Amino acid sequence: MYILGIETSCDETSVAILNDNKILSNIISSQQFHSKYGGVVPEIASREHLKSLPEITKSALSEAKIEINEIDVITCTSEPGLVGALLIGLNFSKSMAFSLNKPFVPVNHIQAHLYSSFLNHEKPKFPFISLIVSGGHTLLILVKDYFSHTILGTTQDDAAGEAFDKVAKMMDLGYPGGPIIDKLAAKGNTKYHKFPVSVIKSNYFDFSFSGIKTSVLYHLKKINFEEIKNEKLISDICASFQEAIVNTLFEKTLKAAKRYDIKNIAISGGVSANSVLKDKFRSLEQRDFRIFIPDPLLSTDNAAMIAFVGYLKYIHDDPGFRYTENLKRKAHPRLDQKLF
Ligand code: KG4
Ligand code: ZN
């Protein structure tokens, strides 16, 4: 079965073609226009998606060496994301499905991150603990089976990636902040300063990263950062900040795995590309845990993960998901569980 997937929920325009769970192409175009604003500008994102989608779709088909009418199912991110950006992808993909008379499957972006490690050579076995850490989301989920998820915890304010982006912005390091902080932190001292991470008393598995962001801001003011900044100081701040975030993500995930007696842990979303986070989780492999982290191109936003969940939904679920001629969406009990 050939599946065409489209992702336009934020600032990556991506189109992928899968043959069942095998990736034939996965073209990702990261919009560069946002870096000078220090964050994604929704209107610019929508316009860029509109401009580049037809070309990227052609490239994805040609790289996969298949014709558009050979596609069996069309899938696209339907939520969550920037509304305008989502609408571009949805209108484009639904029109394509309508004109080709192919089934259309809407895909939840977070579910796509959740299953992204299934595109690796080795896949997690059910049940597993999933840590999803991206620019917009931080979730700890117990995954019992396909589409059987229990959310154990989620962020009460900023997402982990968002904290990286905001702290990078405070020091004028560029956007997105995660990869930049990751690189600079490698040369820094993690013990330079202890930045506190707030604890949510009502649920240990919830996250809160807004406080640490503020504590970095206060620290920068206190040391008169703008006057005294140098490479060493920036690296030290990055290393200490990153250490605090990574430790929090690691400790909560490990505790969840222990509580539910689960040895399989899958980590996904943009922050799963973080080198210290990966090393820390990989070290658990010496303690009988199995760790699944998608390849870097599959950990940040991409259409292959969307196409894969579209495929899973198509083969696991009933026709309630499908759009054919009249493109009317029927409510689906599982999709409407409001898990995400
Ligand atoms: O999953 P993603 O591409 O988009 C969302 O769905 O949000 O994640 C993007 C986020 C950004 O906040 C970015 O700073 C962060 O992932 N990120 C990283 C790293 N690479 C990307 N954070 C920490 N370390 C990294 N190496
Ligand atoms: Zn994402």
Image (cartoon, rainbow, N blue to C red):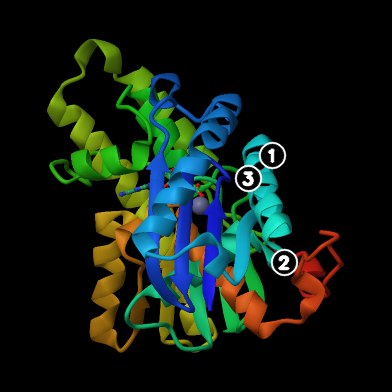
The answer to whether residue 234 is above or below residue 315 is above
Q: Which mark is residue 81?
A: 3
**Residue sitting at 25 percent across and 56 percent down?**
275
Q: For mark 3, give the secondary structure.
A: loop
| Circles 1 and 3 in contact, beta carbons < 8 Å | yes
72 or 75: nearer the viewer: 72
The mark that comes first in sequence, 2 or 1, is: 1
Q: What is the three-letter code of the residue carrying label 1? A: Val
User: x, y (%) of residue 62?
Assistant: 38, 57
Q: CA distance from mark 2 to mark 1?
A: 19 Å
**Visible residue check, residue 225:** yes
The reply, left or right, for residue 330 in relation to residue 256 is right
**Residue sitting at 64 percent across and 52 percent down?**
93
Q: Which residue has dot 1 on it?
A: 83
Q: Which mark is residue 339?
A: 2
The answer to whether residue 149 is above or below residue 302 is below
Is ligand 1 closer than 8 angstroms to the Cβ of mark 3? yes
User: x, y (%) of residue 4?
Assistant: 53, 63
> Where is residue 9, by image quadrant?
top right
**Visible residue check, residue 147:** no
